[in-house]
Image: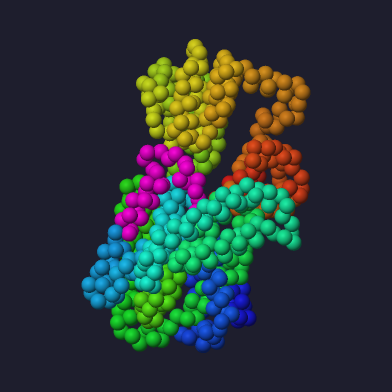
Amino acid sequence: MLLVILMALVIPIWMAKFNLHNIPTAVAEIIVGIVLGVSGFNWVDTSNSQLSFLSNLGVIILIFLSGMEIEFDLFKKKQDSQINPVKIALLSFLGIAAFSIFLGWILSILGLFKDMLLASIIFMTVALGVVIATLKEKEILSKSIGQSILLTAVLGEVVPLLGLTIYASIHGGDAEKLWLIILLFVAAIVLLIRFKRPYLWFNKITKQTTQIDIRLAFFLIFVLVSIAEKVGAENILGAFLAGMVMKLLEPSEATKDKLTSIGYGFFIPFFFIMTGAKLNLKSLFTNQSALLLLPILVLAFFVSKVPAVLTYLKYFTKRNALAGGLLTATTITIVLPTLQVARKLNAISKTQSDAFTLAAIITCIAGPIIFNSLFKLAPEDKIKEKVLIYGANVFSVAVAQELHDKWYSVEMITDDQEAYNTYKSRVKSLKYCNNVLAINEFNYDIVASSGSDSGSDDERNYEFAKKAKQAGVSRVIVRQKQPEANRIAELTQLDIEVFNGYSARTSAMRALIESPAFYEILTDSDNILYDVKIRNHRYAGHQLMDLSFIDKITVSRIKRDGEWLAPHGTTVLEVGDEIVYTGKVEDADMIRELLTKEN
């Protein structure tokens, strides 16, 4: 046990020292386990009951954390009709499933592996943890292609888990009890409903010595794992559901960090190192049929993901589609538990299991390396937010030109032919459209309707803003020259922001009289005022005074859950916080990039 814990400590240190960032830590742990186990020096006793217990607990927590990685908001978002990550992922995985079944049938026909269903389940798996880590490293998790790959990986864990449960029930002689699995899902729903409201209260009463959020997480794990085993399902399905329940309870970033620390800091390395220790390469390389199976399995893992590449090609560049499809070939987290179950059911030999494990390790090394080598951000993906401005006039054109092109991609449309002829030379992205109200696709983060300088466009701005909000645009800003109280109330209720030129000028003049220093901040060309939403998990859980760059900016306010907080040195930041700060343009820009970086 001491040796395993020592290896868990030194493996990431070695990887950092030798700059092995393209290889997942889990794969490195398996390789070290191979060296220490029956294939190498045989220093680790694979029959040790304590090590086996910790290894089993490690895989349960690994699958639990995988369940917590699912972003349910992706299913709620109203996506544009051209690039819909949910649709892309579903099409990709349906193709993967079909190819996997076909490949399983081919292996069965050739006599290389008799169990077609087991092979199909294994081929359609995707290592969600490895995929997420790779996407975070590339900072594309929030992009359309990142979301598409992520959801494909989610399906590549959920569906094989359900398939494994059905497979185990049939082969274990409990097929007649298969309907009892419904009870597991009912239990998960009951636990979610039961703890949804109390969980918010738990966050208020938890102490350093109680850690109620962590106790609840382990309670969920053991309840659903116990029920899973009682109804004849696999314990890892219970663990996965527990992770989903925990995610839906909306834990804080601090809670997620603590659970990740417990899992990856202690339990999970036992699973991967012991997996490698039990891997018998000696018998694998002396068995010709198993040795022949190895390259075929590696090829099958990649070929089964061809549908993902073909689907991505319709929406993304050839280079990125190929990179994303090959990344989904990465598989290890579900393969290993699946092989454990198959071994218990005597559905697979030890040598065949080792061949599958080694093939999965090869994909885990090759997949991220190929992805990192091929993937290249498209120009549009480098822009943080896409902005559409309706209406070309002196005011809106000036705004479009002032927006920082590092953070915003601005497009402008108008239905005024005269305005189009006047400003088309000044705004490259200006487009003329006869009827802007007929637009039914809004692939933008921010839509602002300003109208024209001549006449009152309040009604058209109002209709355009409502249409954009209905299309799922996150922020809609509407200009109203003569705002009516009822209309403002309606727009506010729809979460549409109202801008009025008269009020803005009045506020600016008042600020100039009452708060000249604040007005100077707004108009200063050397310094800049930023309102930034924190997306970088690296800064979650840290106090303001501990930030390395805090001396370069002045933080004035922090907005959390709709409420403004007065910042102090001891204020702990969370992902999703809106932080308002001022600083030198270069420093403020650099800090904005750090805080908004998705990782």
Percent coordinates x, y for residue 543 in the rendering: 72, 51
Q: Is residue 537 above or below residue 494?
A: below
Is 12 left or right of 287, judged from the image as shown? right
Q: Say which quadrant the C terminus sits in.
A: bottom right
Percent coordinates x, y for residue 424 in the rendering: 43, 24
Residue at 31%, 63% (x, y): give it: 100
**Can residue 534 be seen in the rendering of this structure?**
no
Return the residue found at the far left: 109
The region drawn magenta spans 69-97
Return the residue found at the far top: 455
Residue at 58%, 60% (x, y): give it: 220
Q: Quadrant of residue 567?
A: top right
Is 129 left or right of 118, judged from the image as shown? right
Q: In this view, does 50 lie above or below 531?
A: below
Percent coordinates x, y for residue 550 in the rendering: 72, 48
Q: Say which quadrant the N terminus sits in.
A: bottom right
Residue at 54%, 78% (x, y): give it: 52
